[in-house]
């Protein structure tokens, strides 16, 4: 019997959920970088604050995902993701 409070599979799913959600959050900020940026001090400050905000938001979103998975367990969509659905349908 294991003394672990959180099973290893749930920890792994939480880590994956954190990474996935954080990168999705950062991906939504990528279109902002396509804008031409003036090189004045105020503009650079705004860009810096925007980039910092995007990073903080990504970390918070990823943390929320990881805590949700840790609290509720592995979502059914995650457990079925590794199964080839077409193979499973033909095997039965």
Image: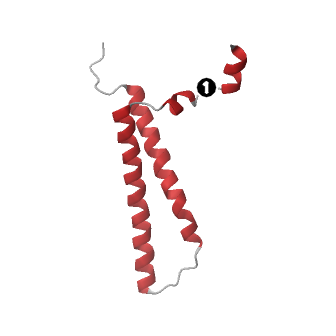
Q: Position of residue 80 (x, y in %)?
A: 56, 28
Q: Position of residue 91 (x, y in %)?
A: 70, 15
**Which of the pair 72/28 is nearer the observer?**
72
Please identify the quarter of the rendering in which residue 71 is found: top left
Q: Residue at x 54, y 57 (%)?
A: 27
Secondary structure at badge 1 equals loop
Furthest-bottom residue in view? 40
Q: Position of residue 36 (x, y in %)?
A: 58, 79
Q: Is residue 77 left or right of residue 18?
A: right
Q: Is residue 89 left or right of residue 61?
A: right
In the picture of the structure, the residue carrying the numbered disc 1 is 83
Please identify the quarter of the rendering in which residue 83 is found: top right
Q: How many marks?
A: 1
Up the image or down, 11 lies above or below 21; here it is: above
Q: Is residue 81 left or right of residue 53?
A: right
Q: How is the image coloured?
A: secondary structure
Q: Few, some or many C-alpha atoms within 10 Å of disc 1 (few <14, some 14-19, many ≥20)?
A: few
Q: Residue at x 41, y 37 (%)?
A: 14
Up the image or down, 53 lies above or below 9; here it is: below
Q: Position of residue 90 (x, y in %)?
A: 73, 18
Q: Residue at x 67, y 20 (%)?
A: 88
Q: Quadrant of the C terminus?
A: top right
Please identify the quarter of the rendering in which residue 47 is found: bottom left
Q: Quadrant of the N terminus?
A: top left
Furthest-right residue in view? 90
Up the image or down, 31 lies above or below 83; here it is: below
Q: Residue at x 37, y 33 (%)?
A: 72
């Amino acid at each position: 019997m294991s003394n672990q409070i959180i099973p290893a599979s749930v920890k792994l799913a939480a880590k994956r959920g954190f990474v996935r959600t954080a990168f999705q959050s950062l991906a939504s900020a990528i279109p902002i970088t396509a804008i031409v940026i003036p090189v004045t001090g105020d503009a650079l400050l705004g860009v810096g604050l925007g980039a910092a905000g995007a990073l903080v938001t990504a970390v918070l979103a990823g943390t929320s995902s990881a805590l949700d998975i840790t609290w509720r367990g592995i979502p059914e969509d995650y457990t079925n993701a590794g199964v080839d659905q077409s193979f499973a349908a033909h095997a039965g």
